[in-house]
Image (spheres, rainbow, N blue to C red):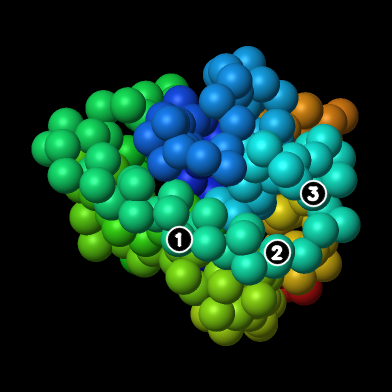
Amino acid sequence: MDVKFILDFDGVLFNSAFEAYSVCEYATKGQSGFRQDVDFDAFMAFRPAVTDAWQYHRLYSDSSAVAPDALASIEPDEADRAFATRFFAARAEMMADAEWAKVMPPYPFFAKLKPVILAHPDRFAILSTRNVESIRRTLAWHGIDGIAIFGQEHVREQGGKLGVAKAQGWCDRERHMAIYIDDMTGHLAPFEGQVLLPLHADWGYDAATPTSISQGQAMRIITSLLVLAQQVPEARWQGIAA
């Protein structure tokens, strides 16, 4: 039985909110058609509802901005998709700075998890709506390389995070014991009944719930399952995962 830990990036491993805000500001500052009055507090009030970069257009547009609770019912139009292109082009320009990754501080969870990832890179994967190159650059800055990364490119191709998980076989519970940690309840909901443990991180951008887990609890779950994976016979895993 393959034990796999699938980790969201933004809000679980790194506090990247200011980086995303900086990209939006870089992409829109002084440009016609965009609001020039979005401060960081307004951005953070909007951020928990965002699942894709195009949605930032509905914060910054001077003609089609919406409240964050309206995002879930909106399908992207041509202007939204154009904004996503602008957003990633701006990020690519900003990443030319060799020290760009400094703008995203890691959570204590990442610092504790890093030696575990380095010891068991095949047990971990990143599943994020962030683009792959920015994830790879950030992890490399912090000394991690060689783990599987699935980003926005894969999410769009597969129609969502769950689509990526299914394509990778993580939802096959006869083959995988998959533990998925995300800070957005909207991202977690589709994983209920699909993977062994969909866990909500209480330290990210979304509001905590009664079933959310802390950074310490997440570490205990991961380290305990790694010990079990080394000690419990395959036949016993079948019973645990059923």
Q: Residues within 10 Å of mark 1 (few under 14, many from 20)?
A: some
Q: In the image, 47: left or right of 13?
A: right
The residue that label 1 is drawn on is 85
Give the image location of residue 39, x and y in percent: 57, 18
Q: Amino acid at mark 1?
A: Thr
The residue carrying pointer 3 sits among few (fewer than 14), some (14 to 19) or many (20 or more) residues within 10 Å by Cα, namely: some
Query: Where residue 98 sits in the image (x, y, percent)?
Result: 12, 38
Return the x and y of residue 140 as percentages of the image width and height.
Answer: 20, 47
Q: Secondary structure at mark 3?
A: helix
Q: Which residue is located at x 72 percent, y 43 percent?
A: 63
Q: What is the C-alpha distance between the residues marked 3 and 2?
A: 10 Å
Residue at position x 24%, y 62% in the image: 146
125 left or right of 92?
right
In three-dimensional space, the C-alpha distance between marks 2 and 1, rounded to whole angstroms, equals 13 Å
Under circle 1, the secondary element is helix
Could you tell which of marks 1 and 3 lies nearer the N-terminus?
Answer: 3
Residue highlighted by disc 3: 71
- Residue type at the position of mark 2: Pro
> Up-down: is 176 above or below 29?
below
- Mark nearest the camera among 1 and 3 is 1
- Residue receiving disc 2: 76
N-term-proximal mark, 2 vs 1: 2
Q: Residues within 10 Å of mark 2 (few under 14, many from 20)?
A: some
Residue, far front = 32
Name the quadrant of the C terminus: bottom right
The secondary element bearing badge 2 is classed as loop
In depth, the one of 184 and 210 nearer the eye is: 184
Q: Which mark is residue 2?
A: none
